[in-house]
């Protein structure tokens, strides 16, 4: 038996194993973060890249003879700027004073560096879509929280750091300060559902993704700065899905005439 070859192979295997665990231990940590609320007294989920989902079902006793159940889903993907959540509460038997309610929450954080502006402001555009359905006297609400700077919901300025979103679609514009070429975007969404009576089902559904659809940069004078690359620490670009403007019909016509002219010149040259 060749002990030299055996020892060499064992050493190489040990090195490969060490490199594998070292790369896992020193995987890049990003300032970007997606945090999802916990389920049944368990800790929440927090990731710095990629996606995560919490899917929870719970049954609890509020009072003797009072049994309620419910469920919620929280999800998000840092890679494409989408997130969403929904919660349902059901009362099947007698209910204590005040009924029962439950909620779900998520928090999204992005850090953008290398913007090329020492000072200024960034503007982020978001869209949301949700619904509230209930039977038996139930209800629900969705709260959006942001404290990074001025912001609007459907064109209305928000004086507080939180507001309730209505059903249907909403357009949200969030403004954050740029300092030393960096800015941070962070917001929180909380959904809640309530059942005050027996035989009640209440659902608050904002699982249709909350999307970050674009970003713009403005200098210290408030003038738009074009060509700023918004790339977060984990690689998300809110402008990656922007479409190239379609030329106007007149432009297309001129382009067509130019092509025909080139064809005519080529034919004359051949002749």
Image: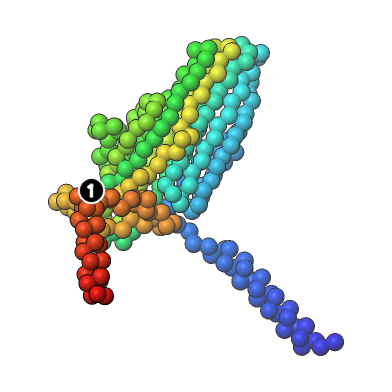
At 62% from the left and 66% from the top, the residue drawn is 21
At 41% from the left and 32% from the top, the residue drawn is 129
In the rendered view, tell whether residue 266 sits above or below residue 130: below
Residue extending furthest left?
221
At 75% from the left and 83% from the top, the residue drawn is 7
At 39% from the left and 35% from the top, the residue drawn is 128
Mark 1 Cα within 10 Å, few/some/many (few <14, many 20+)?
few
Q: Secondary structure at mark 1?
A: helix
How far across and how far down the image is residue 111, in percent?
A: 37, 53
For the N terminus, the quadrant is bottom right
Say if residue 180 shows up in the picture: no
* Mark 1, residue position: 249
Residue extending furthest front?
271
Asked whether, in this view, residue 29 is left or right of residue 163, the answer is right
Q: Nearer the viewer, residue 102 or 71?
A: 71
In the rendered view, tell whether residue 227 sits above or below residue 267: above
Say if residue 129 shows up in the picture: yes
In the rendered view, tell whether residue 99 sits above or below residue 185: above
């Amino acid at each position: 038996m060749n002990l030299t070859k055996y020892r060499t192979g064992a050493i190489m295997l040990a090195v490969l194993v060490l490199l594998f665990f070292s790369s896992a231990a020193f995987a890049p940590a990003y300032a970007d973060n997606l945090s999802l609320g916990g389920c049944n007294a368990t800790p929440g989920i927090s990731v710095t890249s990629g996606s995560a989902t919490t899917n929870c079902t719970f049954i609890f006793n509020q009072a003797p003879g009072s049994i309620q159940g419910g469920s919620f889903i929280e999800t998000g993907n840092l890679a494409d700027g989408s997130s969403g959540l929904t919660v349902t509460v059901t009362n099947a038997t007698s209910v204590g004073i005040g009924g029962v309610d439950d909620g779900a929450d998520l928090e999204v954080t992005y850090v953008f560096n290398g913007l090329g502006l020492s000072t200024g402001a960034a503007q982020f555009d978001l869209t949301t879509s949700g619904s509230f359905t209930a039977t038996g006297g139930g209800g629900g609400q969705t709260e959006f929280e942001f404290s990074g700077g001025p912001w609007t919901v459907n064109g209305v300025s928000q004086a507080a750091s939180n507001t309730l979103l209505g059903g249907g679609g909403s357009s949200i514009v969030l403004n954050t300060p740029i300092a030393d070429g960096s800015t941070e975007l962070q917001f929180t969404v909380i959904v809640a559902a309530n059942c005050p009576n027996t035989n009640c089902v209440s659902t608050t559904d904002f699982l249709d993704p909350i999307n970050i659809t674009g970003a713009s940069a403005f200098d210290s004078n408030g003038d738009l700065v074009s060509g700023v690359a918004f790339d977060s620490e984990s690689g998300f670009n809110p402008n990656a899905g922007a479409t190239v403007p379609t030329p106007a019909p007149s432009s297309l016509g001129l382009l067509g005439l130019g092509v025909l002219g080139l064809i005519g010149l080529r034919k004359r040259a051949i002749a």
